Image: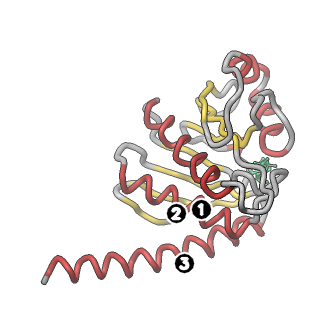
Amino acid sequence: MTKINNATIELVEGDITEQTTDAIVNPANRALLGGGGADGAIHRAGGPKILEECRKLGGCDTGDAKITTGGNLLAPYVIHTVGPVYRDGKHREAELLANCYRQSLDVALQNGINSIAFPSISTGAYGYPLEAASRIALRTVIEWLREHNGLKLVRFVLFGQRSFNAYSHALKEIATALNQDEAEFVDDSEE
Ligand code: ADP
């Protein structure tokens, strides 16, 4: 658990469809009409109401995010975002993946959402290397939380131990680097 600006970042191993946060994030495709992986699981658990709402949204660009209600899910909202398909790292994949996290958080804030659960976007069918994706996900969320007030909880729900370990490792590295920055910042201000 890491605290940033009154918000908590939490890593858990589990299933995104079972989360009781105000919103869960769906790693969707551009059509927003359902798919495999976490997307399929969310639509199965949430029922047809989510798909009905998605049909009216007219798809979603890569890196963008759109909101529906949660249907039969415990979470009242689903924020659908479209991660990049990983090719070779030279097709703006990192920037687009960061956009997914930022846009999802912006949409959450605009809708008065206090708590949100993310899966590991793009690291399944879309093939983004897990270690790199985990660093981008965590850095982007931390940066965003430092710049915005309102969200209380950002939970990463990692499917399987390999994903959980990658995110845990990345968070430790980033937290260490951040604490060093903060120590430097304090030193500067005391001069
Ligand atoms: P993408 O197309 O963005 O890669 P996937 O759903 O294929 O989306 O995979 C994204 C991540 O979500 C992968 O790490 C996958 O293991 C994970 N995942 C799959 N099902 C679930 C679930 N029910 N809850 C949380 N994560 C899940």
**Residue 25 in which image quadrant:** top right
- Crowding around mark 2 (Cα neighbors within 10 Å: few <14, some 14 to 19, many 20+) is some
The answer to which of marks 2 and 3 sits earlier in the sequence is 2
Query: Can you name the residue that lies furthest to the front here?
Result: 90
Where is 164 relative to 76, above or below?
below
Query: Can you name the residue that lies furthest to the left here?
Result: 191
What amino acid type should be assigned to the residue bearing mark 1? Answer: Ile
Q: Answer with left or right where residue 125 lies relative to residue 7.
A: right
**Residue 95 in which image quadrant:** bottom right
Residue 2 picture location, percent across and down: 46, 66
Quadrant, the C terminus: bottom left
Residue under numbered circle 3: 173
Residue under numbered circle 1: 136
Q: Residue drawn 36% across and 77% down? A: 181
Residue 169 picture location, percent across and down: 62, 75
Residue 71 picture location, percent across and down: 69, 24
Q: Answer with left or right where residue 60 lies relative to residue 154.
A: right
The answer to which of marks 1 and 3 sits earlier in the sequence is 1
Q: Residue drawn 50% across and 59% down? A: 9
Q: Are marks 1 and 2 in contact (CB under 8 Å)?
A: yes
Residue under numbered circle 2: 139
Secondary structure of the residue carrying tag 3 is helix
Mark pair 2, 3: CA separation: 11 Å
Secondary structure of the residue carrying tag 2 is helix
Q: Are marks 1 and 3 in contact (CB under 8 Å)?
A: no
What amino acid type should be assigned to the residue bearing mark 3? Answer: Glu
